[in-house]
Amino acid sequence: MKTTNPTVKKILTHYKEISLLGRIKSVLDWDLNVNLPPKAAPGRAEQSAYLAKRATDLWLDKDFRKNLEAANKLTNVTREEKAILRNLNIAGKYYFNIPQKLIIEKEHASSKAFMVWKEARQNNDFKAFLTPLKTLIEIDRKMAKYIGYKENPYDALLDLHEPELTAAYTKKMFDAVKPKLIELTKKMLNYTKDEGLEKKFLHTKSSYPLDKQKELSLMVMKLMGYDFEAGRLDVSPHPFTTSLDRYDVRITNAYHENDFRFSFTSTTHETGHALYEQGVNPDYNESPLAGGVSYGIHEALSRFWENMVGKNPKFLKHVAPEFQKAFPKLLGKITPDDFVKLFHVVKPSFIRIEADEVTYSLHIILRFEIENELINGKIKPEDAASVWKEKSYEYFGISPEKDSQGVLQDVHWAYGAFGYFPSYAMGNLYGAQFLHAMKKTVNFEADVSKGKLANVKG
């Protein structure tokens, strides 16, 4: 990135090395999720911890901090330079305030925790994950103290994901919609009579070959405008997107043999993340302006593509023939309207990433409330599974029998990413505003009905 300011230029030159280390770590994290053998977990934890130490050393470099402090006093900076300083000061809350030893400890703990979580989820055994969970909660509590907060330690963790977001504001927002969502969910149960469709097309004996599902995922990614020369699609236990570089934005997916819908919606969701990263100005590569402006905006793009485009009835009717060709025995005779209905069944469910638009934010509210109380010591980690079941019954009228359907379903706590979940619900709200603005200049419904998504992407 070009700049004429000598102080900012020094900052950017130094930051490039920070960025490169971050990208190397992203490669290791991608491999951890996709390829890593179980016995390699301790070694990977050491590698990740080493990179965390090197990155922290660069952040704490005396000349770098001196230049940043000097740049913060400048008045003749451009709009981009001002944004660079803003982002560095936000990230600095983490690196300048938290002891390096604790940052390294978290990196080490989260790398090991992922493999424990992965096995615990497969075995439906929350107790097996309890020790690393306790460790990560305690580490984040300590980090919150070092970062600083006015009222609630959870605020410090929320701020890392969505700048200036607080638990009080989040609670106020969620309390406004929670009773209405619970009421609407109960009402919808009286009107949704499409379970016959699910039993017909998605029963336990159904078999939607995984290779065909992947072909359909690739087809949808192509329609959305994903650049395959700057990324790839792989498999992981929990779908995710990672940016290894401006020109290397990778997606992973998961597939269910008896339900083709899951891979379709996760594909549109993760490709939404990827399109955001692939769309960032190339001039910002390896600068503090690379990547999204916040996790909430990132989730806005993924939720927008997943729900407002991917599950749009007109778009579903456009792609339905491709699904019929891929699965002629099971879907060959399905009508376009029934195909749409399969994606719009509203009913309580255990799994967040499979939830419909009506109940999805309730899943986020449940997680926010538990996280907030875990960080504040109001819920003991060993009670998290039972509290999850209680809240699930309160909000959805159902209680998970398996830990994999409840407290172990998400990977976020294994990463120590406390404070991330509210970003999803914020993303739903942002995405609605994006659509409202987009329809003023784009013939949205006509475009999605034809699968012509270039204007939407633009």
Image (cartoon, rainbow, N blue to C red):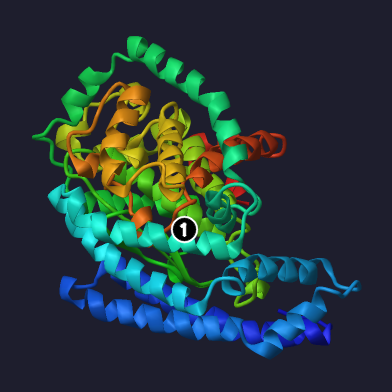
Location of the N terminus by quadrant is bottom right
Q: Is residue 248 above or below residue 181?
A: below
Tag 1: residue type? Arg
Q: Secondary structure at mark 1?
A: helix
| Outermost residue, left side | 205
Counting from the top left corner in percent of width and height, residue 39 is at 16, 75
Residue 204 placement, left or right of 263: left
Q: Is residue 179 visible?
A: yes
Q: Residues within 10 Å of mark 1 (few under 14, many from 20)?
A: some
Taking depth in this image into account, of 66 and 85 the one nearest to the observer is 66
Counting from the top left corner in percent of width and height, residue 170 is at 57, 38
Taking depth in this image into account, of 343 and 351 the one nearest to the observer is 351
Q: Is residue 16 above or below residue 275?
A: below
Counting from the top left corner in percent of width and height, residue 101 is at 46, 78
Taking depth in this image into account, of 63 and 19 the one nearest to the observer is 63
Residue 391 placement, left or right of 205: right
Q: Is residue 325 above or below residue 53?
A: above
The residue to which callout 1 is attached is 141
Q: Is residue 225 visible?
A: no
What residue do we see at 50% from left, 19% from top?
Answer: 180
What residue do we see at 40% from left, 12% from top?
Answer: 187
| Outermost residue, right side | 76
Residue 102 lies in quadrant:
bottom left
What residue do we see at 35% from left, 66% from top?
Answer: 110
